[in-house]
Amino acid sequence: MPRPRRRGRRSRSLNSESLRGGIASPPSSRQTSETGMLRRILYVSSMAEGMTDQVLKHIVAVAQINNRRLDITGALAIAPGVFAQILEGPAEDVTRTLARIERDERHVGLRLLLDEPIVLRLFDRWSMQLLVDDGSARLAIEATQGVAVARELLEQMRRQYTEDPHLSPAAMRGMALAS
């Protein structure tokens, strides 16, 4: 019997200090999709003109809803003028989501840095999380310029997921138990 989904919500402003709000997806009890393999992609793109905090909030909110429905997990890192996004999930759904993203006029110059089949997800608790940290931002900018290696950016985003007590579900559980 599947576990009931718990839905929590954090609302924080998208301004400089705390773009870290988001909805954590419940832990996935399955690591492979019912139709086959999982896929992970990592891409970078440049933000289109006119990107605002409000538009970013909307992008994340819609992604969280769509990704939860499709069992896609991941993270979106932003830097001035740059998106870097990781998506993980059933291969067909990731393919359709990437096609939709490529048609989205809110960003340009999408470069796929990583595309691989996976058995385990790195971001299994996030339908979509917005990461704002200097390391991810620097690597995202370098990746758009062809300098950064995809694995470096993936590892930096994974570290944010697992080590930051404001973002890590595991750390949050530990903090709750300690109180």
Image (tube, rainbow, N blue to C red):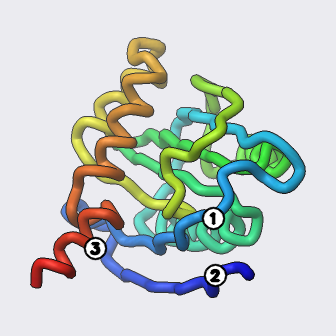
Q: Earlier in the sequence, mark 1 or mark 2?
A: 2
- CB atoms at circles 1 and 2 under 8 Å apart? yes
Query: Which residue is located at x 54 percent, y 33 percent?
Result: 44
Question: Is 167 on the left-hand or right-hand side of 22?
Answer: left
Q: Residue placed farthest to the top in the image?
A: 147
Task: Residue under label 3, please give it.
Answer: 173
Amino acid under disc 3: Arg
Q: Earlier in the sequence, mark 2 or mark 3?
A: 2
Q: Is residue 94 above or below residue 72?
A: above
Q: Separation of disc 2 and disc 3 at Cα?
A: 18 Å
| Label 1: how many Cα within 10 Å (few below 14, some 14–19, many 20+) | few
Amino acid under disc 2: Arg
Query: Which residue is located at x 53 percent, y 67 percent?
Result: 27
Q: Separation of disc 1 and disc 2 at Cα?
A: 8 Å
Query: Which quadrant of the rendered structure holds the C terminus?
Result: bottom left
Q: Determine which of the numbered discs, if any, sits on residue 29 in the image.
A: 1
User: Can residue 143 be seen at all in this image of the molecule?
Assistant: yes
Task: Residue under label 2, please give it.
Answer: 3
Query: Which quadrant of the rendered structure holds the N terminus?
Result: bottom right
Q: Is residue 43 above or below residue 77?
A: above
User: Can residue 103 be seen at all in this image of the molecule?
Assistant: no
